[in-house]
Amino acid sequence: MAVQTRTEAGVERLDVSAYEIATDGPESDGTLEWDSTTIVVVEAHAGGKRGLGYTYAPAAAGGLVEEKLASEVEGADAMAPAETWERLGRALRNAGRPGIGAMAVAAVDTALWDLKARLLDLPLVDVLPRAHDSVPLYGSGGFCSYPLERLREQLGGWAADGFSRVKMKISREPERDPERLDAAREAIGDDVELFVDSNGALSRQEALAWANRLRREWGATWFEEPVTSADFAGLRLIREEGPGGLEVAAGEYGYVLADFRNLLGCVDCLQADVTRCGGITGLLQVAGLAAGHGLDVSGHCAPQLSAHALCAVPNLRHLEYFHDHVRVESLLFDGVLEPGEGELRPDRSRPGHGLELKRADAQRHTA
């Protein structure tokens, strides 16, 4: 019987770059307006291979990688991303690990996992503890700034493409939302689930009133951040007092494990963003915490990076196919996955996650 030898390589260096992509129109949700998206890309080198990771964060996250994290990675065992992850967390003790620190770690960690897979010449999904072959999606956009026709076109388009669930933003101008919700339901039909996201714009009592109305009038099944995700008592109130069949979700702003622990008992489904919660290593910890409390995990955004990572989450619900990130990843990377029947399926014919930076195209968007 042939003996498989272990690949050994030390990480040689990290390359860091940042790009800013303009949106394809004005965008807003319940609490924020924006016109561009910034992505910080990290590339890790070892053994003639290059691993790629990224986070959706201010360009300053790249500076944090260069100042605080690169020296912790150089010379590290490229086959042990989780070991390196522990050192990265310690290196940020005085700089601050939650927030932008966790996002910087996420970019490095995902690059290291991709590097390991490429050194092994295996798809990332098979290097991780694969529990699924594909990841269910929900289409996400429906910004408050959209005119009704754009809202119908976008959400209805996902429904026509086989998505069984779509999400829209609400609560910037609550007086306009009934008309917008009517348009959304008309566009997607009765058989597609309607998700809504207030992005923490409502008070507790407002959110509770809307929860009942959303379920009764539009058949909504998912109410994301009805109140700010820092209001644990408010989330718990909506979950416990709201109507049956309408799940409360939060967690996209979870950075360290304690952030997710604080949400236990407050949500029906725990969201996690691989580009915010410390990368793949952090995501697997969040998934374990959720599983221990009987909760499913829903992936937040970054669909191309999340597809491989979330296949390693046994208690996976679905992944957010977010309009802005779909555009950014298609513009910057070769090897992007295309949805089929409302799912993303990792390409197991390519090593790592299969993404390659389109350098000439990316250069035009340097932040």
Image (cartoon, rainbow, N blue to C red):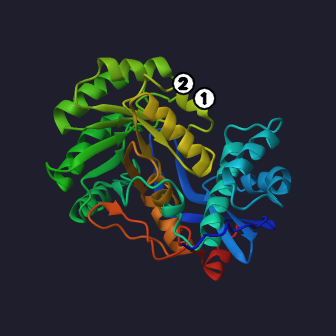
* Residue 6 left/right relative to 315: right
Quadrant housing the N terminus: bottom right
Q: Quadrant of residue 154?
A: bottom left
Q: Residue at x 38, y 17 (%)?
A: 237
Mark 1: amino acid: Ala
Q: Is residue 324 above or below residue 101?
A: below
Q: Which residue is drawn at 45% across and 47% down?
A: 313
User: Could you tell me how far apart the alpha carbons at marks 1 and 2 are, in whole angstroms?
Assistant: 6 Å
Q: Quadrant of residue 235?
A: top left
Q: Which element is circle 1 on?
A: helix
Which one is nearer the viewer's eye here, 124 or 272? 124
Mark 2: amino acid: Asn
Which residue position holds label 2? 262
Which residue position holds label 1? 258
* Residue 183 left/right relative to 125: left
Q: Which element is circle 2 on?
A: loop
Q: Is residue 342 visible?
A: yes
Q: Where is residue 93 in the image (x, y as percent from the top left)?
A: 80, 36
Q: Where is residue 88 in the image (x, y as percent from the top left)?
A: 76, 46
Q: How crowded is mark 2: few (under 14 residues within 10 Å), some or many (20 or more)?
A: some
Q: In which quarter of the image is residue 182?
A: top left
Q: Residue 226 carries which label?
A: none
